[in-house]
Image (cartoon, coloured by chain):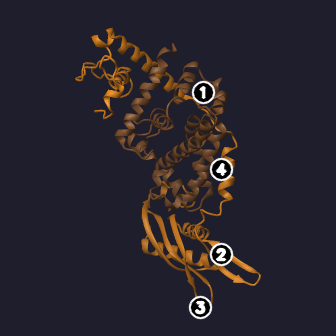
Chain colours: A brown, B orange
Amino acid sequence: MVRPGTAVPGTEETALVARARNGDVRAYESLVRRYQEPMYRLAVRMLSSSSDAEDVVQEVFLTAWRRLDQLHDDSAFVGWLYRSTTNRCLNVLRARRPMADVDPDTTATRRVDAQPEHAAELNDQVAALLAALGQLTPEQRACWLLREVHGRSYDEIAHVVDSSTTAVRGRIARARAQLAEVMRPWR
Amino acid sequence: MALNGPPEDNALPCGRSLERLWERLDDGAGGPGGAGRSTDGTDGTDVTDDHVRSCPHCSAALSGLGELRTATTSLKEERVRPARDLTARIMAAVRAEPRGLGAMFALDAQERGRTDISERAVAAIVRFAAEGVDGVRAGRCELHAAGTTEDGTAMVEGRLTVSVAYGVEFAGVLERVRRQAVDACTARVGVLLARLDIEVGGLDDGARTGEPGRSIG
């Protein structure tokens, strides 16, 4: 059984990456259409802001275009996108943190929480999960989302967050325990 | 598959491991890979064993894990989408990007201004020219500036990877590719393609390439 998102990239995708590397803008546009949604979903759950998430996705794809030359393995493109998206989200969150330190009273507006603009579409249980996700550290949240929602492998996540596979496993296990604890009284 | 996480972090007050409960929950759900798996595990943690059924810690934890799993499935299935114009915004930024074109080199420099062209633009011309030869598909092309000739013409050199249709006569076809590429560079850009190494990266089954006009048939 291949988990969603961990499938070996098809030769079609590899060919698109190769063409994009040669400057084929239309091939690159196909890649953008194919992968902007998963990257956006990751970013929006990391940042709880659709506009910040869109900014991140835009930067990710622009930077990828600039650096295609440095990508030695065309089939590694998607993993590269996940790494880039995750790191940019973590940077955005780090940049937000000092605001909270300066004035705790204003943090509510920047608090990571269930996303108001989508809240109506989600059932209460998912809303509770999103609120619980907001209680995790950004790194824990990233690892958990990459694993449980995006189906990335432990090895890949370790590479994304510059950590060991063992540490990532531990981090995800603790995140899961914490989330389960919050979800327990939900019903 | 042993988990290497620190068990003490996730141990329940009764001593059972939360991770094992989670694993068992997965297996017991009859999901792919878990269906039919025996429940009499060797680690002593069985979702349905006597301890778990009677232990308040275990059953509370199981209910939390169950809720989490259901919510996670919903989260996975939700389709939040970016604004419709995100692709257009990304592509506008990409098109406006002078980088991504490879280095620029001068075609000529006159009093009325100099003309530069990117290595990548020349590479694109080489690829198009190569694909003009029947049975050839162009892959990666990397070129770089290689100085100027005595009369001031810019020179480039580099490598081209091609796939060739099965059954064609290699030497002749590849020589045609090289000649077409050189001619195109001279005629269309005004640069001299001084050297082009060609690598055959693959063989195509001509009938299956799906590239219009590229099959040998």
Badge 2 density bin: few <14, some 14–19, many ≥20, Cα 10 Å: few
- Front-lying residue, A133 or B139: A133
Tell me, for residue B188, which label it has, or none: 2
Check if mark 4's residue and mark 1's residue have beta carbons within 8 Å. no
Mark 3 vs mark 2, foreground winner is: 3
Tell me, for residue B39, which label it has, or none: none
**Is label 2 in a helix, a strand or a loop?**
helix
Mark 3 vs mark 4, foreground winner is: 4
**Mark 2 → mark 1, Cα distance in angstroms:** 57 Å
- For label 1, the residue is A114
**Mark 4 → mark 1, Cα distance in angstroms:** 27 Å
Mark 1 vs mark 3, foreground winner is: 1
Q: Chain of mark 2?
A: B
Which residue is outermost to the bottom?
Answer: B150
Image spot of residue A93 (x, y percent):
57, 40
Q: Quadrant of residue A27?
A: bottom right
Mark 4 vs mark 1, foreground winner is: 1
**Mark 1 → mark 3, Cα distance in angstroms:** 68 Å
Mark 4 vs mark 2, foreground winner is: 4
- Front-lying residue, B158 or A70: A70
Same chain for mark 3 and mark 4? The answer is: yes
Image spot of residue B172 (x, y percent):
46, 75
Q: Quadrant of residue B16?
A: top left
Tell me, for residue B150, which label it has, or none: 3
Note whether A69 is above or below A165 in the view shown: below
